Image (cartoon, helix red, strand yellow):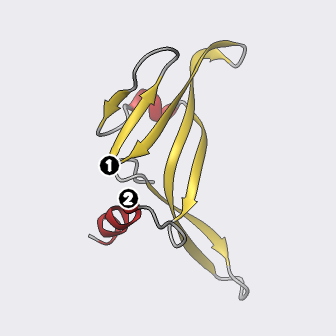
Amino acid sequence: MDLQHGLIQIPYFNADSQVCWKNYRIAALAFHIGQTARSGHWRAALFHCSRWFVYDDGKLPEQMSELTIDIQRQVNLIWLIDAELDRTPLATTAAAAATA
């Protein structure tokens, strides 16, 4: 997983039972800050124009070039876009970064 460029590869089996890899672009993620699922606080981060926008209730998003280790450890949910089907301007930038 390359959080700096918002990319992830996920393995799958093809029709011949061989392991293949599929590329996805990370669109957003949700993470939880707290000791238990019943206490703490949920936050979200969106990846746009090679930057992370970390959202919290009622505040402007904090911009980050990379997610902190604490955030990365607390990710619970990731929204993905198939890199082959992605036609957004970011897709071109992300594809170039993945092949570099």
In the rendered structure, the answer to whether residue 75 lies left or right of residue 12 reads left
Query: In this figure, which residue is indicated by the disc labeled 1?
Result: 50
Secondary structure under badge 1?
Answer: loop
In the rendered structure, the answer to whether residue 52 lies left or right of residue 25 reads left
**Separation of residues labelled 2 and 1 (CA atoms):** 8 Å
Query: In this figure, which residue is indicated by the disc labeled 2?
Result: 90
Looking at the image, tell me whether mark 2 or mark 1 is earlier in sequence order: 1
Question: Which amino acid lies under the numbered mark 1 shown in the image of this protein?
Answer: Ser
Q: Quadrant of residue 53?
A: top left
**Whole-percent x and y of residue 79?**
59, 48
Q: Residues within 10 Å of mark 1 (few under 14, many from 20)?
A: some
In the rendered structure, the answer to whether residue 90 lies left or right of residue 25 reads left
Look at the numbered discs 2 and 1 and tell me whether their residues touch, using CB distance below 8 Å. Answer: yes
In the rendered structure, the answer to whether residue 20 lies left or right of residue 92 reads right
Question: Which amino acid lies under the numbered mark 2 shown in the image of this protein?
Answer: Leu
Instruction: Determine the residue positioned at 31% across, 34% down.
Output: 64
Instruction: Determine the residue positioned at 32% across, 63% down.
Output: 93
Q: Residues within 10 Å of mark 2 (few under 14, many from 20)?
A: some
Instruction: Determine the residue positioned at 52% across, 73% down.
Output: 84
Is residue 26 shown above or below 59? below
Disc number lying in front (2 or 1): 2
**Whole-percent x and y of residue 16?**
71, 88
